[in-house]
Image (cartoon, coloured by chain):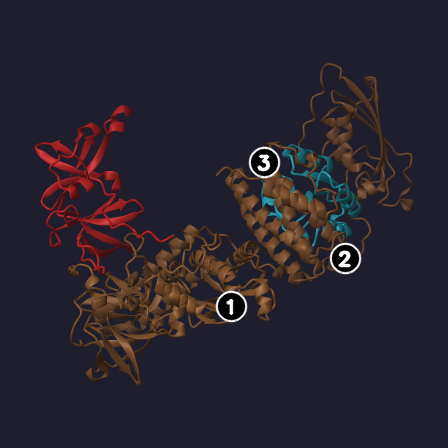
Chain colours: A cyan, B brown, C red
Amino acid sequence: MNATILTVDDSRTMRDMLRMALTDAGFRVIQAEDGLHGLDVLRQEMPEVIITDINMPRMDGFGFIEAVRQDAKYRAVPILVLTTESDEEKKLRARRAGATGWIVKPFDPVKLVSAIRRVAA
Amino acid sequence: MDPMAEIRLTFFQECEEQLTALENGLLGMQEGSADSELVNAVFRAVHSIKGGAGAFKLNTLVSFAHVFETALDKVRSGSIVPDADAMKLFLRAADALSDLVSASRDGAVLDTAPYAAIEEEFDALLGGAGGAAEDDDFQSLDFQPVTTAFSGEDAAPEAPTAPARNSFLIRFRPLRELFAKANDPLALFRELTRLGRLQAQCDIKNLPFLDTMEPEDSYLSWELRLESDCDIAAVKEVFDFVDGDCDLSIEVGLPAQPAVMVAAPEASGPPPRIVQDGQADVAVPPPSVAPLPAPAEAEAAAQPKASARTAVQPTIRVDLDRVDRLINLVGELVINQAMLTQRVLHSSHVRDREVTSSLEELERLTREIQESVMAIRAQPVRPLFQRMSRIVREVADATGKDVRLRTEGEATEVDKTVVELLADPLTHMIRNAVDHGLETPEQRIAAGKAPEGTVRLAAAHRSGRVIIEVSDDGAGINRPRVLQKAIANGLVPPDSQLNDSEIDNLLFLPGFSTAQSISNISGRGVGMDVVKRSIQALGGRISIASSPGQGSTFTLSLPLTLAVLDGIVVTVDEQTFVIPLTAIVETVKHEQSRIHHVGEHSFVLRVRDVLVPLIDVGAELGVRPPANQVRSGVAILIETANGSRSALLVDNIQDQRQVVIKSLETNYKRVDGIAAATILGDGRVAMILDVDALVGLRHHDWSSTEIPFAKAS
Amino acid sequence: MIEKSPHDLAREAEFVAFRAGGLEFCINIMSVREIRGWTPATAIPRAPSYIRGVINLRGVVLPIVDLGVRLGLPGTEPTARHVIIVAQVGERAAGLLVDSVSDILSVEDTSIQATPDVASNLARTFVRGVIAMDGRMISVITLDNVLPAMELEAA
């Protein structure tokens, strides 16, 4: 069975690109368009990995990660954040919120997959 | 379509949405809104565009967006509080970004000077901190999706038969934070096995007894030996994510001794069992131990679940072609239903009550389907109004005026095509309003007005039509000058006595250029006559009202949908025509006593106490020659866009009907006096009259009509 | 279907031959959308004499051009026996009113001869060349100017 990945990003373009790269790599993809929506989706389905953007309306990446980590059910789900290369501060903040790892935007599909492998057993 | 091409389309569509949100947000900020969410939204809009642009290697767009984003970030964080000038800079940057997006989409060659200029202004704003893009961010990444089979069974790479070049000794002790972030040593080890041959040994000496064990703490450490062709950087990379959450040391050493080989850990296989009593595998954080406090989601999410769900209206995207096809089919349905009704009702045999009521029900249903389908194409005028916002800024800048655009009724819905076709006329009117309608700040102050002028754009539904008003609080129409100009251009005789409204309407005459000097702004002196024709082509009307010193208002009245019209079907000399209901005031009993001869072929009709021109439709359209005597028939009192009234003389009125509008221009051309065509119940084409034009034609000299119309069979 | 060599296909075209105003003409089949019988047309106010009006073609308003009149020949009062060739004229579609349709010709480009000098000016506007075939003289028509020009908006 294919592993399921939840992608959370308010940009349709980014969601499409992630979906393309991930399905090409053999994953099944479910999507949400911001943190709140992501929590909704999580209530219905548990993915193997979550990939989330940081800047989103309603609930941003940090809020989302914190909310996810607060629920014991999801504590073990690896969360990768999409960040821009130069933003160390965001990366740190994401990690403090509980992010498992990160993917740099614009993302390289090969690196995307290797990042996923590093966090999903 | 190639998937990347499709995503590229999506990206540019999304850019449009982001640019709109950006402009709206900036305008809101300019109005003084202190909503921090607005600033965030503005930042996100630019950030989003930058993100997508990077993936498509649109480097110019990326670097400009980056500078813009950096400045917005500073506003977001509070380190800059933008003043009025800064807001203007942001708005200009937004306009420039929009141009840049378009150019990137179309692959156009771009003049980079304006962008460099704006970037410099940003630099100055940021105190020379410079928002220059960092090259690292924007490596040209070749976005070729890589097919990697990632199924559960991950075959361990074959150990190289030749002795591996490097041997690494890795000491790894995860801290509890590592697990708290859902990192998994198993995943890391498996990644290591992809680099070479791995032996792992687990040290359990720190493991306490179960009763003192903290489920979320970490007690294990590993010593790993890796034989690999890779260098140390590759090994370190595996541990990138857990850096700081573990004790890690990597030594490069001699090729490992052939010690105890531990098979590469499989996805499902646990590391060597430590505790015998069937306890949960502590290498993996036990997710199910000890009920934890109920999720604080309700707090984190500032809204209750229910509202989060209802907040977003479900929508679907549909190809416009499909909608149009559906609309055409519905149009056919309407015609066929009309044909059926007519044939059945006129068949003398069928007077069956049930049949009649069924037909009525059919008509009602058809109408409802039609309205629902038409509504699909209805769109709010908002995007159209928002485009005007930029036009106002540009013209104001270019003419040195201080202008503010106020909009009302942006949610008013109009047929999609109407929205598109309104763009040009509206643009022209807005430009005129700023360029000619409004005075300069100095003039305004001298007149006791605020230096900032206002242009108001409003839309509303009224009695089955869409009413759009374009008004300004400027100087109003300079009537003496307009009259003079019209006389000078030979549009009216020199001794004309015209009332205010008539003078205002001179603006709509072809050949009247309202500009003293044809400024670049208003185009090549296009003229309000073209605007009027565009509006009429849409089935609309335009009228004007003006007060000297106070301003002018143009009022557009447009049909709600393009494709249907309520009309009165009339006959003239056995030809059938349709008169739009909206133009009709009433039908007038046509008695000889009410008609007065005022010229060779000119008549007026007395309606109550008012005299109105009587227009012989048949003669106007060339169906029959103009008469010297009053013809019999029916007079229909109509009102034109500027409010003046006339009466149309026809032979008979058949009935009132809703008709589907068909274009005459598509395959033929525009005909003066004819708005469009329709297909009647019997399948024949009938012309829909353009009442305003018909009244306008009245002023033509009879001798200039073309060859007498030959009857078609 | 007989296999033609690419060489042949490139230089051969098919034409629909018809009679109008007593003479024979043909147009490239690529322009022809369909052929149908005559239906009464609705008059267009103040239209030129060669425009017979418009008809309803499956919901589309189609202008009817009396091709004979357009070519400067005597017009005819159309009857049910007349034929309308629905043709694509640039971006527009129009119905060409003709007396009858004869056949479909396969003609090589080289078979088309230049229009004879004696032809009227009007004919020259529309006639691209002449085909001599089996004792017939068939004028090849181009439809470019057959409809009245669209008004140029004072842009």
Q: Which mark is residue C31?
A: none
Q: Is residue B115 left or right of residue B552?
A: right
Q: Which residue is mark 1?
A: B475
Identify which amino acid the numbered label 1 is placed on. Ala
Q: Residue B164 at what x, y percent from top left?
A: 75, 17
Q: Which residue is mark 2?
A: B296
Identify the residue shown where x is 50% and y is 59%: B435
What is the secondary structure assignment of the residue under circle 3?
helix
Q: Is residue C140 left or right of residue B296?
A: left
Identify which amino acid the numbered label 3 is placed on. Asp
The answer, for residue B526, to whether it is visible in the render is yes
Within-10-Å neighbours for mark 2: few <14, some 14–19, many 20+: some
Residue extending furthest toward the top: B162
How far apart marks 2 and 1 lie (CA) works out to 61 Å
Identify the residue shown where x is 10% and y is 49%: C74
Identify the residue shown where x is 70% and y is 48%: B71
Instruction: Verify CB contact (< 8 Å) between mark 3 and mark 2.
Output: no
| Figure quadrant of residue B230 | top right
Q: Residue B559 at what x, y percent from top left?
A: 40, 65
B567 or A62, nearer to the observer: B567
Q: Which mark is residue A24?
A: 3
User: How many circles with numbers are drawn on the protein?
Assistant: 3
Identify which amino acid the numbered label 2 is placed on. Ala
Q: Chain of mark 1?
A: B
What is the secondary structure assignment of the residue under circle 2?
loop
Up-down relation of residue B375 to residue A41 (above or below)? below
Q: Are marks 3 and 2 on the same chain?
A: no
Q: Indicate the quadrant containing the C terminus of chain B: top left, top right, bottom left or bottom right.
A: bottom left
Q: Chain of mark 3?
A: A
Q: Chain of mark 2?
A: B
